[in-house]
Image: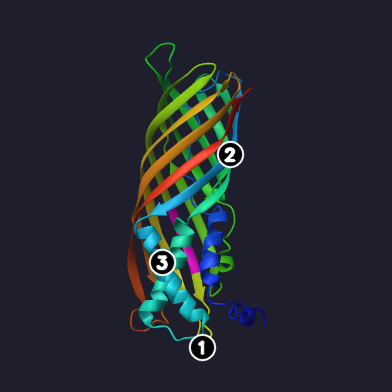
Amino acid sequence: MRSMLAYRIPRPSVTAVLALAALGGCAPSLSTFQTAAVPPTGHFSAAVGMEGSIPIGTLYDAYSTGKDVLEKAEAGQTLTSAEKWQAFDTGMELILSPPSVGYHLSLAYVPWKRLEVSLRYAGSALRLGTRYQLLDRATGPFDMSVGLGVSRFTYDIPISDYVPILKMDDFTRWQLDVPLLIGMQNRWFRTWLGPRFVATFFDAALRLDLQVEQRVLASMSGSAYYVGGQGGIGFGYRWVFLAFELTITEMMGSARFNAPLITDSPSRTVDLSGLVIYPTLGLMGEF
């Protein structure tokens, strides 16, 4: 009964559902939202804010193309093999890099001089990271730090809430990032910038539930790489700062699909590419 009700959604519903993805917070977090300076030994630092993902180019085109196919399926019409693949492509883009807004929460501690360990929740993923300060403003022209972070996505993306005919039966995703930042700061001002590199690895099982046809199962695995740059600025006094960070990256990668029930084309490889703009706004503090 529940699945039948899902098909009775009026035609404009797909557009509305895709718009709701902007509130899902499912995109990989591309923000560092920290300065280039590691705090003194024994100090904590924390950040809380909102971050968003704005896909442009081929990523946006996938949403536009898939929307028409999904509306056709919801209306009970038969899909061609090419249209079934377009529906799966839309699901893949919603998994990998949807338009999204989510929370950014982080806490870091400095157990030894120049070395920091941190825990962060952002983009529906839990991240464990560390970084080391290579240069500091007291002995050099600027602060400079380099780090390493590993993220594990903590729950399955509720893709069927956005696209009723698509279901996710399994989902695994890991993410690796290497932040390198240079910057300067004083009691009332902070600024930082650097290159941005993020790698993500994923496996998923998707199911296309069609009203007038047999359901179609597809397995998906692949990897994607985000390469670009970021910069941030913050104003405040001593311990608390209001900060804004902007990250711009190009996504590159590929995904391999297998769908045995699409008999004329049971598998294929999809190249992934697109520009992603990722702003973050929030509070940074040190204590």
Rendered image: mark on residue 64: 3
**Dominant secondary structure of the residues highlighted in magenta in the image:** strand
Say which label, 3 or 1, has the lower sequence index: 3
The residue carrying mark 1 is: 212
Bin the neighbour count of mark 3 within 10 Å (Cα to Cα): few under 14, some 14-19, many 20 and up: some
- The residue under the point 45% across, 23% down is 133
* Residue type marked 2: Gly
Say which label, 2 or 3, has the lower sequence index: 2
Cα distance, mark 3 to mark 1? 24 Å
Cα distance, mark 2 to mark 3? 30 Å
Observer-nearest of 212 and 151:
212
- Identify the element where label 1 is drawn: loop
The residue carrying mark 2 is: 49
Instruction: Give the residue at the far right of this rendering.
Output: 1
Q: Which one is in front in this view, the residue at disc 2 or the one at disc 3?
A: 3
Cα distance, mark 1 to mark 2? 45 Å
- Scheme of colours in the image: rainbow
In the image, residue 97 sits, relative to residue 68, either above or below, namely above
Give the percent coordinates (x, y) of residue 36. 45, 26
Query: What is the quadrant of the C terminus in the image?
Result: top right
Observer-nearest of 269 and 52:
52
Rendered image: mark on residue 145: none
